[in-house]
Amino acid sequence: MAVIGVSTTNDRHPANVIYNKNRHRYPVEVFAVNPRGGSRQGECVFTRISEIPTPVDLAVIAARAEYVEGIMADCIKNGVKAAVIVSGGFAESGRSDLQERLVQMAREADFPFIGPNCLGIYAPGQADTFFLAGERMVLPPTGHVALISQSGGILVDQMIKFTAEEVGLSIAISIGNKALIRELDLLEALAADPRTQVIVFYIEGFGRNEGRRFVEAVRRCPKPVVVIKAGKSRAGSRAVSSHTASMAGDYEVFSAVLAQFKVLEAKNETELLSFCQSLLCYPRNIEGRVGIVTGSGGHGAVAVDYCSDLGINVPNFSPDVQANIKTLLSTSIQNIAAIDNPIDLTGSAVDDDFVNVANLLSQAEDVDCLLFLMLPYLPGITSDVGARLGQVYQQLRKPMMAYVPLVEKYRMIIDGFEFNGIPVANSIEGAVQMVEALRRPPSC
């Protein structure tokens, strides 16, 4: 990696932050470049790419906009394979001519670049072109979600939220003005990436006719793709235009097209996180008939309301199924439990009641998935209940989701679910959103 723009006098310069981070924290050979040359902390600062004694895979350009064209020409001439252009001052600030010259040069030379006006690439354990100090960053674990965003700030915020929920990333890419490499290019690359299972796009806008090509490609993608859109209001559209020079378009039309092409749209960041957690566990579709099991009637009623808002079907159980459920329950709750859907096992339920109901519903033909609203403070519930329900899933493979309050003392229950591949939400709404994520055809 060559970092172009490194300062010998200002170690807070974005190029210095990128250089220092990669040199000390990642297994990448990194070189500093500045036309003035010199040294910093005893290390050579090369005056140009051609002086670097080894081939360069990636150039990170963090210099003033008017210098970038010449720097890119030098990179192309000296066999650099690709670039991230961190620098701003292009189409987003009215310099479309300068940006177009970069694109034309890159296309003629078959030279790929990300940006400009971006953070670039965070590849867990490999490299990081974000000009954010390492001690300020919150980094998710290595995992299987790819995050692509026009906004670097939104991308970093999502990384913080993913870290809190222990959702891992395969890669995170801030594309900024997306002058050359755009969403469609990255979609095609990530569809073939064995490390990526779920692909997420934060989109501010598309160029003319680009949106249709994108949704058509998403429909063909063999992996789940989630889209979240900015610029939903008129004021938001104006903000998008000034931010990355994107054409935000009419949000209602955009959202309708996503629905028409069966593309999964997250309405907000909370929903986005729930979708990713669910799709990592169950990358396939269901009809959306959910069986809800709880120890609190109020929790069940709230879940049904959320399901109703989303159009998720909470079917009534047949008299035969209800009778079978009743026979499986502890004698102490047989006459007080509500055994229609949602099933309220009451505060007197024990682990066996949840496990027995899970076994029965996992074999019921009129239920596609199970939603458990677990209240770990109920006196009959033990810390093993998550693991025991997880074993039912492992045997019968009917998708399950769980709500468990996110408190450290309940961690053993949460781990029991997650170790067995069952996603856990820290809110009832989030758990219902996990069900919603699966109500899509596999082509999405």
Image (cartoon, rainbow, N blue to C red):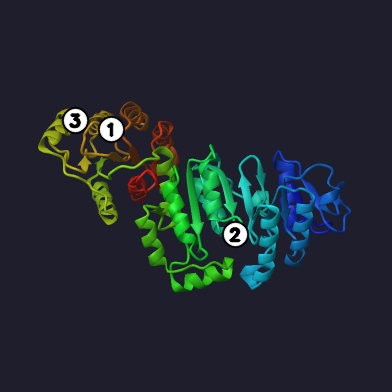
User: How far separated are the C-alphas under marks 1 and 2?
Assistant: 55 Å
Q: Earlier in the sequence, mark 1 or mark 2?
A: 2
Q: Amino acid at mark 1?
A: Gly
Mark on residue 178?
2
Q: Nearer the viewer, residue 307 or 208?
A: 208
Residue at 59 percent of width and 58 percent of height: 152
Q: Position of residue 426 (x, y in %)?
A: 39, 46
Distance from the alpha carbon under mark 3 to that under mark 2: 58 Å
Q: CA distance from mark 3 to mark 1?
A: 13 Å
Q: Can you see residue 305? A: yes
Q: Are marks 3 and 2 in contact (CB under 8 Å)?
A: no
Q: Considering the numbered disc 3 on the image, is that residue within a helix, a strand or a loop?
A: loop
Q: Residue at x 66, y 66 (%)?
A: 100
- Marked residue nearer the N-terminal end (3 or 2): 2
User: In front: mark 3 or mark 1?
Assistant: 3
**Front: mark 1 or 2:** 2
> Could you say where residue 283 lies in the image, as x and y percent from the top left?
40, 40
Disc 1 target residue: 380
Q: Residue type at mark 3: give it.
A: Leu
